[in-house]
Image (cartoon, coloured by chain):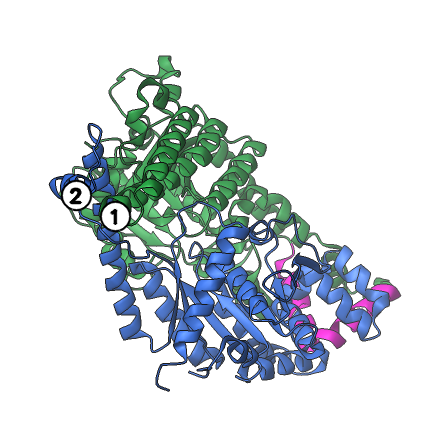
Amino acid sequence: MSPAPVRPAADGADADADAVPTSETDPLERLVAERSIVVCCGSGGVGKTTTAAVVALEGARLGRKTVVVTIDPAKRLADALGLAGLTDTPSRIDGDWPGELWATMLDTKSTFDALVAKHAATPEQGERILANGFYRNISGALSGTQEYMAMEKLYELHDETDFDLVVVDTPPTRHALDFLDAPRRLSRFLEHRLFRMLVAPSRGLVKAVNVAAQTFLRTVSKVVGGDVVEDAIAFFQAFEGMEEGFRTRAARVNELLAAPETAFVLVASPRRDTVEEAHFFADRLHEAGITVQGLVVNRVHPPFGAATTGGADATSPSGAAAVTAAVAAGTARRAETLEGTDIGGLYRNLADFQAVASREQAHLAGLADAVAPAPVAWVPFLRSDVHDIAGMDEVARYVFNRAD
Amino acid sequence: MTIFAVDPEQFFAASRLVIVAGKGGVGKTTASATLARAAALAGLSTLIVEVEGKSGLPAMFGQGELGYDEVVLSRGGGPDGAADVRARTLTADAALLEYLRDHGWSRISKRLVSSGALDVVATAAPGIKDILLLGKVKQLEREGLADVIVLDAPAAGHAITFLQSARSLLDTVSVGPINAQARDVLELLEDHERCQVMLVTLPEETPVNEAVETAFSLEDRVGIGLGPIVVNGVYPTVDGLVSDPAAVTAAADAADVSLRAGEADALAAAAAFRLDRMQLQAEQLGRLEAQLPLPQLRLPFQFTTEIGPAELDVLARAMLAGIESLAGLPQ
């Protein structure tokens, strides 16, 4: 079987000619060889964690000391990466490669705890915060915390360890890119009117808190219970003075994300809804001044001869889609004429797959254009899920264009 | 396991609320739409409730965006004599406003939402947003506005936290209206005659593993009743598939058809791909059956990249056929 997926953006990438000392090197492989951070983002269920692991393995194969930070990996992949126990410190995976491969699973709470400890003016302040019920909820449940901590972990590994390459997987939500606004979100939360209102009593200004605010708080207490509000007040009091440190840190994380040493790789599957999500992510990154450096499309259906039938037209993605669609329509007509025979069944089956391939190519043509000149890698449907190094090597053949 | 019905109408009447849950990428929204359309074809009016905003749901019915207000996705009547399918999106902010208004706190409600204080409150008592959403669903269920309510739940693992929110909130908030709301929601979730969860998966290794894990977590930690599991994307069998180009040529000869150059290879490769994937799917379906004692509702793979009204009808009819064949299973 020869899936032979087209690689529409390869010519687009070559346009960046002056950055190509070795024109033979695959552009995605060059990212892995040269950048110090690779962030894999995309919606849930598109193979993001696997892609991150494959990129990290490639880093080790290229002789670099690489670490991959994963979020909620499938169990068997986690086992393959030596992540059986929930661990916040990277563990090394032994293998036959010149570099080093390390892996770690994001532990949102302990990352946040470390951040609090780092910014606390005194150890007592840190302890007071860590013991607070409201803080425990923030570190576990505040929307965006996981996203923010993934980036914090990335910064920490990049800045405070000697890894050459840090590869990070992002959470599988639409909010995965919320870390881009981390400073603003944090400020909004921590400098909240309610915050100032809650902190005031610690300065002995109980009377200065206006009556409206008191009424408001009392009503909130009635709805959610008094303990909850007391915990929140205690948290904001304990946190006072630490906002600035948090904000500075978050700003530095964002600078690093936008720096030339960082590459964002978009991961998608060829279904219409996930392609739309990928467009959303690409737009969101663009707004933040970040250029997508690569696109990996997983689970692509092979066109079964259709893409090559069209000859020269098939070299552009939309051309390939149109050619495949025309071929599929022809095959479908044959299937109808021959319905009821064995060869008719064979034609029906071929027509069905060619139709899927043409639709996939059409969706992806738009996406490839949207991220151009970023290189695009097409990974076909594989026989089994990836849960060992051999499986990652198989995916790597497609991601880094070494197939066939 | 709770339900083994004799016909689709009884099947859907067994519990008014059906919560559809599954990991990202398994076709959870497709399953919700299919379930709703199938219930409508069985003559039951159906309301789909979404909680995550933007999804492909309206497009499956050939419609535009959803909002907080109810819209009709497919009108009943017609040659099928089907009932209406309606849909709406719930947001925690809107549910909170409504809740406060209904409980005589309209004065503070606007301020609580507009000042962003809801974020602070929601952080103080995590799960509060989930409870507000589930509380609203409970109200819809009580009001009996539709024969069947399909809740397109957030993607699992969040589904587990989402459905567990009632129980965890009872620990954090020990008194007051939120506590009462959590109690009501918990009562609904645990009542198998009012509510059941339908898990969605794909016949592939990782989705099967995750469906099994989610099923056990939901039963153990939430105490919720599980209905049949929906398996999306199962390849239907096709007669005459052979993966050897020589056999393809023989089949062509038998029908007096001449093949173009390279055609035998393409036909054989496509057949090999299909046969190979069908075998892998059969293994995974068997594994799912062995590990999870739930009946399976298998939906056929659609050879397209997006589900529209035509595909949805095919899926809904396949689901109805699946439900009818469930009746034959032993209890």
Say whether residue A215 is magenta.
Answer: yes
Q: Is residue A368 visible?
A: yes
Q: Position of residue B223 (x, y in %)?
A: 48, 82
What stretch of residues is rendered in magenta? A211-240
Q: Which chain is blue?
A: B
The N terminus of chain A is located in which quarter?
top left
Q: Are marks 1 and 2 on the same chain?
A: no
Q: CA distance from mark 1 to mark 2?
A: 9 Å
Q: Amino acid at mark 1?
A: Thr
Q: Which chain is green?
A: A
Marking on residue A341: 1
* Residue at mark 1: chain: A
Q: Position of residue A332 (x, y in %)?
A: 36, 39
Q: Is residue B190 above or below residue A52?
A: below
Q: Is residue A218 above or below residue A285?
A: below
Mark 1 Cα-neighbour bin, 10 Å: few <14, some 14–19, many ≥20: some
Q: Residue drawn 25% across and 62% down? A: B282
